[in-house]
Amino acid sequence: MALQSELEKRQIQEAYDNLLKSSRHALTDENRQTIDRAFDFSNKAHEGVRRKSGEPYIMHPLAVATIVTKEIGLGTKSIVSSILHDVVEDTDYTLDDIKNLFGEKIASIVDGLTKLEGEFDFKQAVNFRKMLLTLSDDVRVILIKIADRLHNMRTLDSMHPNKQLKISGETLYIYAPLAHRLGLYAIKTELEDLSLKYKYPDEYNNIALQLRNKEEHRQYLVDRFIKPIEEKLNKEKLTYSIKGRQKSVYSIWKKMQIKKVSFDEVYDLLAIRIIFTNTEDMDERRKCWEIFSVVTSIYNYKQDRIRDWITIPKANGYEALHVTVMGPEGKWVEVQIRSERMNEIAERGFAAHWKYKGDSSPDSELDKWIERIRETLQNPESDVLEFLDDFKLNLFSSEIVVFTPKGEMKTLPKGATVLDFAYEIHTELGNKCIGAKISHQLVPFSHKLKSGDQIEILTSEKQKPQSHWFEVVVTAKAKQKVKDSFKLEHSQHIDKGKEKIEAELKKFSQVPSSETINKLLKHFNLESKIQMYAQVGSGLIVLDKIANLFKDEKEENKLVKYWKLSLGKKRKTNQVSGPGNVAIDKKKPYILSEENIEKNFVLAKCCNPIPGDDVIGYLDANNKLTIHKKSCPEASKLMASEGDRIITAKWKQFKILSYLSQILIKGFDRIGIVTDITGIISKDHNINMRTVHFDTTEGVFTGELDLYVHNAADVENIISKLNKVKGVESVERIE
């Protein structure tokens, strides 16, 4: 035991020494002493505590601090905050202790990190929103939290499968997009790959294996591709580095899912990065285009695959020039061209952005984005999980750049509409928007904008937000403004309705007691007085027929009795639980058997899983178990927001019942092809078809078929057979 203790002490000291060596900043004696004090304090506070993996707990904060300085590039305060980040949450020490020992700023960062500890449920989402409100004051809170999440993902092996699902789902849902938006591309990529590894282990391992198998050939192609580029660049006497870059497992998997292609069909698996050294008199943009000219003088390029992020950088500060060219053996190759400064910002994101941003520099799109977060979060009554959904959607969006009539530049997510632009300028402009002029052409407010558009918003005093506007706007800011408008109008209707009801009751010498209000609710078949006030105030309910309610006392007693009876029935109805109410061990996969379907679990309507699909279970507050596909967007949201209710699930063999599945077929039309397709399904496989629809345009057909199958293997067998039919080009299951 003593020997092991000494061994652990050496391991801890080695981890600490590695942290100090990893610092990307020169440490002064004072900085070193502060870090030493933090290490001694945290080591003592966590003494005797172990992680799930069995190692001493202090190894975790040391690893987080190493990521913070080595991979993100933050300084002493961030290192100290990382070392201390779990002390308040997990030990008897308080925030005041941290403040007294290490100062107000470090205590503030530790406080922000402490609020983000624990489970990511509704309360956690509230804390997440509070933390985002401090983003523009000190972004280090989020950067350290991302580092904390990265180390947890790197050590996820020691967790139970249901925890692995929860944490990986949460990581994909919010932390990877956050890392992306803050420019931490290397960390974002690793978070995505690790999440895929635990969420879809078979797919991850298969892609990783194929990448390893083809690594030698890929390197041959890279060497062959870069050789003529190096020869030309050397003549320019340019200091540069050029190397191949492998696409991540997650990015390959995502393309395979979206485009329904195999590994070998994934576009531009090869990528090359050219990084040149800056000199004081160098015009970086011009040099990028000169290198672009060198590359495209050797290889033909795809005109619609040029990405110019040096003229207008991405919202997270990313700058580079991308071009896709035709390389050896007919392989498309993406070439990324950057300066060393651009590369550091690309790799280390926000920290490097601030390093290069002088006091006199104008605010970047990243600064503006952070300010937009603060604007979006100002309303404390907004739905938190709904906000997180909108916030996440805007994290990964590609950007477009548009202009006001006076030439002011605005950055919006790709897919943004005229209405989004109007709300971006001013709330009232959005509320009154009826359309716009773009290039002197009138367009509706639902018109989707393109980069370079110059927009003049048209308004009307009679216009006001409508419910269908939620289908028009895409930015979180615009959605919140529309919600705020409805809330204000709703509040005004409630006040007006309350006044009307009280005035009407006075005519019959009645007061708005609970008994009287309940009579009215029953009369109008409503559930709450707020609902009644709002409908009366908006004119949906007219009060000219309520006189009979208060004429006869006996009738009144009948109404009260009937109301109580109906309320009692309603309460009983609400207490009826769905299928489930069985004891479930969350640490073990739940076995889905045919005899228990609809009795112990139900299949989610949002994704219609069938036996054999990769699934998870969601256990709601009534102990009702719903089975979702892992790929279902609703399941991803549940894994992130209610991870403790997620369980792993496995199918037992299903042979009796049939389940509805849909397939999509595309190909070239010919006489008899529909007969061939339906014959394979009904005769060869004895599978019933609910609906069959074929549509042909200029010799190309599309077919949609709803089939009753026993399991996913049935679908795979049918797809395999149909792919061999002459004229059929593609067959896929519609998710």
Image (cartoon, grey):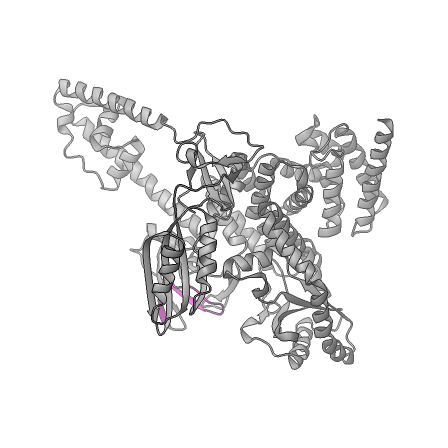
Q: Quadrant of the N terminus?
A: top right
* Displayed quadrant of residue 669: bottom left
Magenta range is 441-457
Q: Nearer the viewer, residue 453 or 378?
A: 453
Instruction: Give the x, y percent position of residue 323.
Output: 61, 72
> Could you tell me if residue 125 is visible in this image?
yes
> Could you tell me if residue 182 is visible in this image?
no
Relative to residue 369, is residue 503 depicted above or below?
A: above
Instruction: Give the x, y percent position of residue 660.
Output: 38, 48
Q: Residue at x 58, y 61 (%)?
A: 263
Q: Nearer the viewer, residue 670 or 543?
A: 670
Instruction: Give the x, y percent position of residue 290.
Output: 68, 77
Q: Residue at x 67, y 77 (%)?
A: 295
Q: Is residue 10 magenta?
A: no
* Displayed quadrant of residue 369: bottom right
Q: Residue at x 73, y 38 (%)?
A: 60
Q: Is residue 645 left or right of residue 83?
A: left
